[in-house]
Image (cartoon, helix red, strand yellow):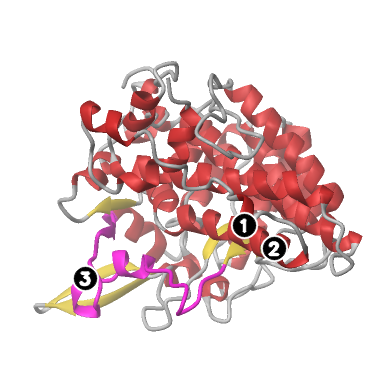
Amino acid sequence: MKSTIHHLFFAALLGATTLSITACDDLLEPTPVQQLADDKAITDAGSARSATIGVYDRVQAYYQLNWPVLGFLPGDNVRFNGTLNQFLQIDQNQLSADNVLITEAWTQMYQAVNGANNVLAALPGINDPLLPAAEKNQLLGEAYFLRALVYFDLGRGWGGVPLVLTPTRSKENGAGLRRSTLAQTYDQVLADLTQAESLLPETATRNRAVKAAARALRARLHLYRQQWSEAEAYATQVIGSSNYRLVTPYRAISTAPFLSQESVFELTFSNSDANSMWNNWFPSALGGQFNFQPVPAAITLLNDPATGGSRSALLASTTINGSSVTYGNLYSRSAQRDDPSYVLRLAEQYLIRAEARAKQNKLTDALADLNAVRNRAGVEPSKAATAEALLLAIENERRVEFAFEADRWFDLVRTGRAGTVLGVTDQRRWLFPIPFNDLVADRSLEQNPGY
């Protein structure tokens, strides 16, 4: 039987078509895409640096389109404005195991994991005078951070997943590896973040991992695990750093040259390494496909001075056939194609700490954190006076603040509110399906219930 991990890495070869079981039997022999050939091993300073950049590139691949879509399209801010079934399934919360976006995201994520594993396995043994100890530690820290980010995303998307912690060198690697539990998956994320924080520099780089990025992701991890005091503590470390601040106006977070002081970690693009996300949001009159459209309720919230404030800049409008059409404007650099992918922002750290404090009945401090975000947006302070009212206000604030980022669906799932807010009462649908192709490749891999 072929290993799950073999299939994870060669699945990208399958393209966007759904293969039959018979076809799969003939395609299980290719070398895994991420197998590291002996003549391309990480052996010196140059190859170590290149390999680390390669891991960023693989993370960038799933954050450009697939992951944001899986974060916002199942929620209540955005609808799919087209006919492609893979998007309609996500929009309607009716995913199938052969969904192309699910398969692509899963494959891209495990490609990133394997890239990080290659760096982590090779770097400690490199002795190159051009690679000083400080830089070696930094590269190791970046690999640990990126692997933690991917496994965190895999966990919140699919639940417990196979934990691959060594490089995939051949088809046989990973044979017999089964899914870990969600708790075990998050334990691995924590272990990687702990290592990353100890190795990374205390600098303000925003498109490479540093200590603050590890702390910010750890605050998010503790929030998801309902470890309120730890979430508060790590968010406080990031908020307390002089390297970060909430920027005004709100639009400054997504205005070139990017890397604003609010950004803790983002993935950067350029015209030669393009982010085409704008094309999915812009109407055809502006050269786009208008695949993703803000729903009327989200438009109302963003345009309302009492809720959206300056976040109305996330919307723009144009006239088509004599009618005004509103579209999402977070990704707006259609000519330069260099919009970043937003991963960790300071505003989230304030709202993480607000939620964690509210859960600990620190209501005054929680309200202050919530209002820091509202104040930056030019919105009147909240007057929520109870823990229940505060938590709802924080939930609503996150909906507006991260309207078109990979946030809303995962928020409603982690808080158990996806049934109440979205009507997705079948909790089996709160997790994504394991891709069909991987189930075919390894019969020991268990599907999530309900698929």
Distance, label 2 to label 1, CA atoms, is 8 Å
Residue 17: x %, y % from top left: 23, 44
Q: Is residue 209 magenta?
A: no
Quarter containing the N terminus: top left
What kind of element bears circle 3?
A: strand
Mark drawn on residue 220 = none
Q: Of label 2 and label 1, which has the lower sequence position?
A: 1
Q: Secondary structure at mark 2?
A: helix
Q: CA distance from mark 3 to mark 2?
A: 49 Å
Query: Does residue 451 appear left or right of residue 302 in this picture?
Result: left
- According to the picture, the residue beneath numbered tag 3 turns out to be 325
Residue drawn at point x = 48 percent, y = 26 percent: 3
How many angstroms separate mark 3 from mark 1 (CA)? 51 Å
From the image, state whether disc 2 or disc 1 is nearer to you: 1
* Rendered image quadrant of residue 19: top left
Residue 257, image x, y percentages: 58, 81
State which region is magenta: 268-296
Dot 3 amino acid type: Val
Mark 2 = which residue?
A: 47
Query: Which element type, helix, strand or loop, lies under badge 1?
Result: helix
For residue 40, the mark is 1
